């Protein structure tokens, strides 16, 4: 049997067709400092250059043997394009992702411009996707992601206004989330049209450490259903933090796969949802790849596989300053221990 | 009704109003405490703060979530704003001199957990120096030295900004090992907090209420 090319492996994986081995990829940032150093640039420089963004993603995948590159890197490209500005920390020696400096103070102030796809760093991301496609295509799948409507709203409106609004300004919050839903669909479709091979919707601000399952059902579920029905496959729903109480509702949203982090009890989730669900997760990327001794990483990855994931995904962006040996052990264990079939995906 | 009976009744009502997220009610009740000549500090600690402690428990039991926590905090502030100017320094004791530097570290603009902790320290009678959010690391060190605060509370919601906390802990402990450092935020675990050399941690806004109360009592013990 010949070894599959990474892109084919991921395509088959999402089609639930047998693969040669478990793919090693993510739907969130996977850039590492090893790639940044090899390129001779600073982390702060990747956010404003399509070349740097695409090449650091590809270099990371080449260095560690990932099956995919993932673009964009930060959560501020859309808010910036909507006029909320961006803090890039370009003088900082720390590894800092951009943030949104000025959110709308009230729901009444929010106004979505129509030309945002061409504003801010949106064209940089478009170009980076194009480079990743042309330079990495075939060797790697190209993954894209967009924040979910509630999380996107939290990047644009002061979070306390949004959260309190779920109790005190229900109609206004519903209207705003409906606008966000249309926006998320537009951006995700845009990236799909540019060639993203899979699309991850990161509704990370909606776990039950923040809002109740009742509020989740009321404000989140229907919007996610609308998004997933508007996008072509493969589509993933990722929520980090506490998801045990909402995992069944997540599964009703129409995504092709569900991604959860280390706070989810995956073995229980597998029991609740059955084997016919593509489940991705669920190690703590910071603890596993930055803090742990490399010798402990193998067990973490095996535990994810034993609990019943179809592919081992980090619960969030890989922290760029991950230890080289830890990332290598993570990839090696996925390939070695992932030779046997997962609950939903067989092996050739 | 005797003064004691009235006190008990008003304190219970204040606590209930916080739990019920009723800003108007806490405001009215706080005013009544003053009108009846009752002790403002007693009303803050055993009325408003007692209510917030129940709120923290409700959060832990998944009956309340962050929206409820925020509305309860608003209710608490409505009472605190009225009562605070009437608190006597002698009621506060040592904590009257207590100072806290608080902020969300650079690269992070999430400040809900930070604001809840800030509120609990204000309730406890501390002077809070709030640096806001997205605060450069060295600013925490400068502010601690400038104010000679006993506590520095740092918050980071994102894993990606958590590393900055480690540097702040090191910088502060190097200059003044006696400063108590509290770390908060979703990515925080006991192990990370210990690894970073902190004295306390909270991984959620609800948990922050309990942790702040614990830290305040620990400091009071130390001051005795």
Image (cartoon, coloured by chain):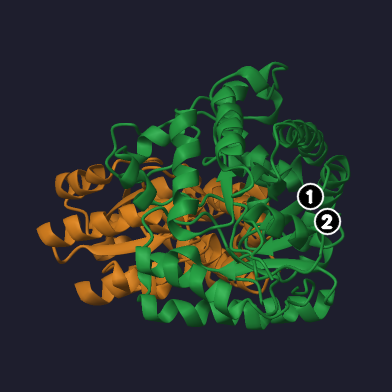
Q: Are marks 2 and 1 in contact (CB under 8 Å)?
A: yes
Residue A248 in view of the camera:
yes
Question: Neighbour class for label 2 at 10 Å: few (<14), some, many (≥20)?
Answer: some
Local SS, label 2: helix
* Image: B200 above or below A210: below
Front residue of A54 and B150: A54
Identify the chain drawn in orange.
Answer: B
Front residue of B167 and A294: A294
The reply, left or right, for residue A159 in relation to residue B219 is right
The reply, left or right, for residue A13 in relation to residue A86 is right
Q: Which mark is residue A217?
A: 2
| Circle 1 residue | A220
Q: Residue at x 16, y 66 (%)?
A: B178
Residue at the front extreme? Answer: A1
Q: Residue at x 67, y 46 (%)?
A: A163
User: Where, by quadrant of the figure, is residue A103 drawn?
Assistant: top right
Image location (x, y in percent) of residue B199: 30, 70
- The chain containing the residue under callout 1 comes to A
Identify the chain drawn in green.
Answer: A
């Amino acid at each position: 049997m010949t070894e599959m090319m990474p892109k084919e492996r991921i395509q088959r994986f999402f089609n639930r067709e047998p693969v040669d081995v478990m793919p090693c990829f993510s739907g969130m940032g996977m850039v590492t400092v090893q790639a940044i150093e090899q390129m001779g640039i600073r982390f702060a420089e990747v956010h404003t250059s399509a070349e740097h963004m695409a090449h650091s993603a590809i270099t990371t995948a080449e260095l560690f043997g990932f099956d995919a590159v993932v673009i964009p890197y930060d959560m501020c490209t859309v808010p910036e394009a909507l006029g909320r500005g961006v803090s890039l920390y370009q003088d900082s020696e720390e590894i800092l992702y951009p943030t949104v400096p000025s959110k709308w103070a009230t729901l009444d102030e929010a106004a979505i411009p129509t030309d945002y796809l061409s504003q801010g760093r949106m064209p940089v991301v478009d170009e980076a996707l194009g480079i990743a496609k042309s330079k990495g295509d075939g060797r790697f799948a190209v993954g894209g992601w967009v924040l979910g409507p509630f999380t996107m709203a939290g990047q644009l409106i002061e979070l306390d206004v949004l959260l309190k609004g779920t109790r005190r300004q229900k109609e206004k919050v519903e209207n705003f989330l409906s606008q966000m839903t249309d926006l998320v669909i537009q951006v995700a479709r845009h990236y799909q049209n540019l060639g993203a091979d899979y699309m991850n919707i990161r509704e990370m601000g909606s776990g039950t450490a923040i809002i109740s399952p009742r509020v989740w059902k009321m404000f989140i579920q229907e919007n996610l259903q609308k998004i997933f029905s508007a996008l072509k496959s493969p589509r993933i729903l990722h929520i980090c933090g506490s998801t045990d109480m909402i995992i069944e509702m997540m599964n009703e949203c129409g995504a092709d796969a569900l991604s959860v982090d280390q706070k989810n009890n995956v073995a229980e989730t597998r029991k609740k949802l059955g084997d016919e669900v593509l489940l991705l997760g669920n190690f703590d990327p910071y603890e596993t790849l930055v803090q742990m001794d490399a010798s402990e990483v193998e067990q973490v990855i095996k535990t994810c596989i034993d609990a019943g994931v179809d592919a081992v995904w980090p619960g969030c962006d890989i922290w760029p300053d991950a230890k080289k040996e830890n990332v290598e052990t993570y990839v090696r264990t996925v390939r070695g221990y992932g030779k046997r079939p997962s609950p939903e995906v067989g092996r050739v | 009704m005797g003064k004691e009976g009235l006190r008990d009744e008003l304190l219970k009502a204040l606590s209930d109003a916080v739990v019920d997220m009723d800003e108007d009610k806490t405001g009215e009740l706080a005013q009544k405490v003053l009108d009846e000549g009752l002790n403002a500090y007693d009303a803050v600690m055993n009325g408003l703060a007692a209510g917030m402690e129940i709120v923290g428990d409700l959060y832990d039991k998944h009956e309340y979530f962050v929206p409820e926590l925020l509305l309860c905090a608003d209710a608490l502030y409505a009472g605190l704003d009225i009562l605070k100017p009437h608190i006597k320094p002698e009621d506060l004791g040592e904590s009257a001199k207590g100072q806290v530097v608080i902020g969300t570290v650079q690269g992070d603009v999430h400040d809900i957990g930070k604001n809840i902790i800030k509120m609990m320290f204000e309730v406890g009678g501390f002077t809070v120096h709030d640096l806001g959010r997205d605060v450069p690391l060295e600013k925490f060190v400068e502010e601690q030295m400038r104010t000679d605060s006993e506590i520095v509370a740092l918050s980071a919601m994102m894993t990606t900004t958590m590393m900055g906390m480690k540097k702040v802990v090191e910088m502060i402990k190097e200059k003044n090992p006696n400063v108590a450092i509290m770390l908060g935020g979703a990515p925080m675990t006991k192990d990370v907090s210990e690894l970073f050399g902190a004295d306390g941690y909270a991984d959620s806004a609800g948990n922050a209420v309990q942790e702040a109360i614990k830290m305040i009592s620990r400091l009071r013990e130390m001051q005795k």
